Image: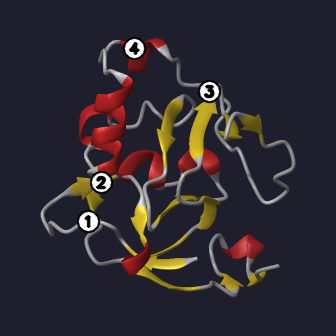
Amino acid sequence: MVFSFPDQDPRDVHCGSVQYHRDFIKRVIGLPGDKIEVRAGQLYINDVPIKNEPYAHFSDGEMRQPESIRAFDLSPKKYQELWQNHELDGILQDVQRDFFGPVVVPPHSYFMMGDNRDRSCDSRYWGPVPLKDVRGKAWFIYWPPSRMGMVH
């Protein structure tokens, strides 16, 4: 899916830099009402582990530990609120890559993830993508160049 970055403040930093109004291309992982969680690098949608993701790539062998998230002592309600308001990565930085959520995708929004799961700036960090920010369906993969081609 092609979408405009879902942040309204042009000064906000996400994934190490300002992303405001940039176009992104990511895979739609969650629809409104879906419960999304990542446990030890394994994606779960509505408590079901997603096993068949031939497009997903994992390039960093080092697993981030859940203790680093627990140190922030966020209640599930606060975690959801920070994530939904595009503020979670400001608190957690990048520790939620391998242990994320659970969160519930809000109405009229989507949960997006990149195929290079270990190095993707995606909804785990900056939150849901509102329907109003969606531009359309991607039809061509251009990054990384080694995977350039049509989307299937």
Which marked residue is nearer to the observer: mark 4 or mark 3? 4
User: Is residue 150 shown above or below 40?
Assistant: below
- Cα distance in 3D space between marks 3 and 2: 22 Å
Query: What number is the disc on residue 7?
Result: 1
Q: Is residue 2 above or below residue 36?
A: below
| Residue 38 figure quarter | top right
Residue 73's quadrant in the figure? top left
- The first of marks 3 and 2 along the sequence is 2
Instruction: Identify the residue at image location x=73%, y=51%.
Output: 57
**4 vs 2, front mark:** 4
Mark in the foreground, 1 or 3? 1
Which residue in the structure is indicated by mark 3?
62
Q: Position of residue 119 (x, y in %)?
A: 55, 49
Few, some or many residues within 10 Å of mark 3 (<14, 14–19, 20+): few
Q: CA distance from mark 4 to mark 3?
A: 18 Å
Foreground tag (1 vs 2)? 1
Helix, strand or loop for disc 3: loop
Residue at x-position 43% and y-position 55%? 106
- Please state the horizontal and vertical placement of residue 78, each as a whole percent of the image: 28, 30
Residue 149 at x, y percent in the picture: 77, 84
Task: Work out whether mark 1 precedes mark 2 in sequence or the reverse, and give the earlier one.
Answer: 1
Q: Are marks 1 and 2 in contact (CB under 8 Å)?
A: yes
- Relative to 129, say whether 70 is above or below: above
Q: Position of residue 99 (x, y in %)?
A: 54, 28
Q: Secondary structure at mark 1?
A: loop
Label 4: which residue? 70
What amino acid type should be assigned to the residue bearing mark 4? Answer: Arg
Circle 2 sits on which residue? 14
